[in-house]
Image: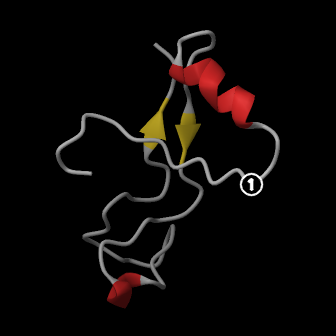
Amino acid sequence: MYQSSAFVAAWIGTTEGEGITDVLFGDYGFRGKLTYTWPKAVTQESCNQNNGCSGALFPYGYGITPF
């Protein structure tokens, strides 16, 4: 992951894969924000929005909006 300029964690186990390809190929603008904190280590599994956890891989609200 550290060697790439971007990645998508879609976790869609349905038939909506076409929506992902639409944004990957530029048919629609990509946007998204994390609704949880993505921990860097297993010991941070209880990290979330306002509990004072620091050093997470991706903090709550991390993401992009269309430009």
Q: Is residue 67 above or below residue 58?
A: above
Compared across the picture, whether 2 is left or right of 30 comes to left
Tell me which residue sits at (36%, 77%) in the image.
53
- The image position of residue 46, as x and y in percent, is 48, 85
Q: Nearer the viewer, residue 45 or 22?
A: 22
The single residue placed furthest to the right in the displayed view is 15
Quadrant housing residue 38: bottom left
Residue at disc 1, secondary structure: loop
Q: Amino acid at mark 1?
A: Gly
Q: Residue at left 30%, top 72%? A: 40
Res 22 quadrant in image? top right
Q: Residue at x 56, y 29 (%)?
A: 31
Using residue 21 as the reference point, say whether residue 16 is left or right of it: right
Q: Is residue 11 above or below residue 15?
A: below
Residue 59, position as x, y percentages in the image: 39, 59
* Residue wearing tag 1: 13
- Residue 13, position as x, y percentages in the image: 74, 54
Residue projecting furthest to the bottom: 43
